[in-house]
Image: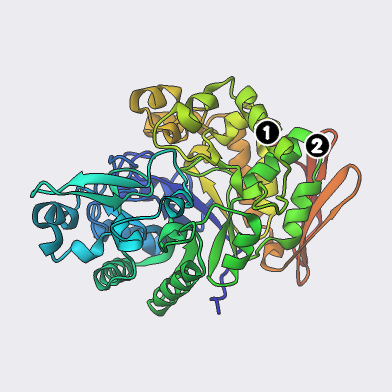
Amino acid sequence: MTNAVHTNQIQLITYVDRLSGGKISDLHKLLNGQLSGLFDGVHLLPFYPPIDGEDAGFDPSDHTAVDSRLGTWQDIEHLAKDYPIMADMIVNHISAQSPQFLDVLQHGAASKYWPLFLTRDKVFGTKPDATQLSAIYRPRPTPCFTGIRLANGQIVPFWTTFTANQIDIDVDSEPGKAYLQAILQRFTDHGVKYIRLDAAGYAIKKAGTNCFMLPETFDFIAQLSEQARALGMTCLVEIHGYHKTQIEIAKRCDMVYDFALPPLVLHTLFTRNAKALKTWLDIAPRNCITVLDTHDGIGIVDAADHNGEPGLLTDPELDALVEKIHQNSKGSSKLATGNAANNVDLYQVNCSFYDALGQNDGDYLLARAIQLFCPGISQIYYAGLLAAENDVALLQRTGVGRDINRPYFNQDTINQALQKPVVKALLKLIKLRHNMQAFNGSFSHTLSDNTYQLSWQHLGHTASLTLTLDSLTAALAWQNEGEAAELLQLHSLLA
């Protein structure tokens, strides 16, 4: 049983240190100042030490602390009073530099933290079956085990799903359960309203399976969600995978991501055909967070087939989609995707959404309009809000593929971005969407040969987005009860 979630919201997703002056208090000022009236909440990407680790905060050495370079828990509390905060709960792993793992390195199996960490032998025994090992689902091109030398010279194959610096925890162990409970308690003590379960699909490992999204994983997610709810928090589960799996997960938790939306929106605009998008929105979970871009790449697996079952797009359609992204970005996305860069996922294309659309202002605004009219809470990534281009210089400096869409802004570059016509238009669109009261009601959509319409109705309020496919133009129409009907051509916002 899930919580009733108020979905008529627009949230910002951002790193604290990559937007504003680099502190939580600076971000708070920005939200209350230049971004005033835009957002109902904010997803703060990992703010735990170290924010500049191997995976930009997703390898915490202390998950219950705020990196002192950003501020304090008190700053989080102050922000939470104005904007409900979503924080990441990294359930699968912890940094190899954490005090707990350093103690394991020193004392081995005698460490009180030894049960906290997962080794290959804990799951497969001391003589693992090669066939079982080969069946493990891999999100990265790197091995899933890393042999790490303890102080006594013993080399132990620790489970490292993502990188060698991210040591998987045993969530079924008593120390593992206590570790996760401590994070939940710290969040609720300081006003965090939403938690995002990061990498939850990999948390349960079992010999003889692919160790991804097992029945036991669903149980784990349900139990952790229940613990969060008991503390007054709403739980978002972050899973990239087959769209029918996403539907099943949505039945067992408060909220899921609509990761299928980004490739389907791109496919719609590239082919001027909304059939695949319409098919998905017919069945998509309504308790969802919609995104076009995130701190990760543009998901491809979410629209793909799986074990012989058809996906939302065919393999040739996905191949054409990826190639078009590379073409629109003038090849820069290729530098950051697949084995071309470190620390990347095999199932995503690393590219800013603005560059994925060839920096076409009209198409970009149309993509955002579609997102804002889809069911669910709309999350706007900070780089997308500011129509950021691929940061090839940052990628070349770090070698981290996803950094191409994780730019750093200071106040001067924020000011410059806010003057861009496409950014001005997007801010206007968000504010218009805020004033349309129909989004508290029911969603419907219709597709004809050349027109796709997304509509909302609530009591006497109505709102619709009508997309003309061959010209890629759109009109907004809305009427709040007791007020005159209004009509706006979307491209007029760019004037």
Task: Write down the quadrant of residue 177 in the picture.
Answer: bottom left
Q: Helix, strand or loop at disc 2?
A: loop
Residue 48 seen: no
Callout 1: 10 Å neighbours few (<14), some, many (20+)? Answer: few
Quadrant housing the N terminus: bottom right
Q: Which residue is mark 1?
A: 319
Q: Nearer the viewer, residue 52 or 79?
A: 52
Labels 1 and 2: the sequence-earlier one: 2
Q: Name the residue nearer the viewer: 424 or 19.
A: 19
Residue tagged by mark 2?
Answer: 272
The residue depicted at 11 percent of the width and 63 percent of the height is 110
The residue sitting at 53% across, 70% down in the picture is 254
Residue furthest top in the image: 330
* 489 horizontally vs 412: left or right: right
Q: Nearer the viewer, mark 1 or mark 2?
A: 1
Q: Position of residue 119 (x, y in %)?
A: 28, 56
Is label 1 in a helix, a strand or a loop?
Answer: helix
> Which quadrant of the rendered structure holds the C terminus?
top right
Q: Quadrant of residue 331?
A: top right
Residue 455 position (above or below residue 261): below
Residue 488 visible somewhere in the drawing: yes
Q: Amino acid at mark 2?
A: Arg
Residue type at numbered disc 1 = Asp
Location of residue 473 (image quadrant): top right
Q: Measured along the vertical axis of the image, is residue 437 above or below residue 411?
A: below
Q: In the rendered view, would you say 486 is above or below 440?
A: above
Q: Is residue 154 left or right of residue 298?
A: left
Percent across and percent down for residue 451 are 87, 45
Q: Residue at x 19, y 62 (%)?
A: 114
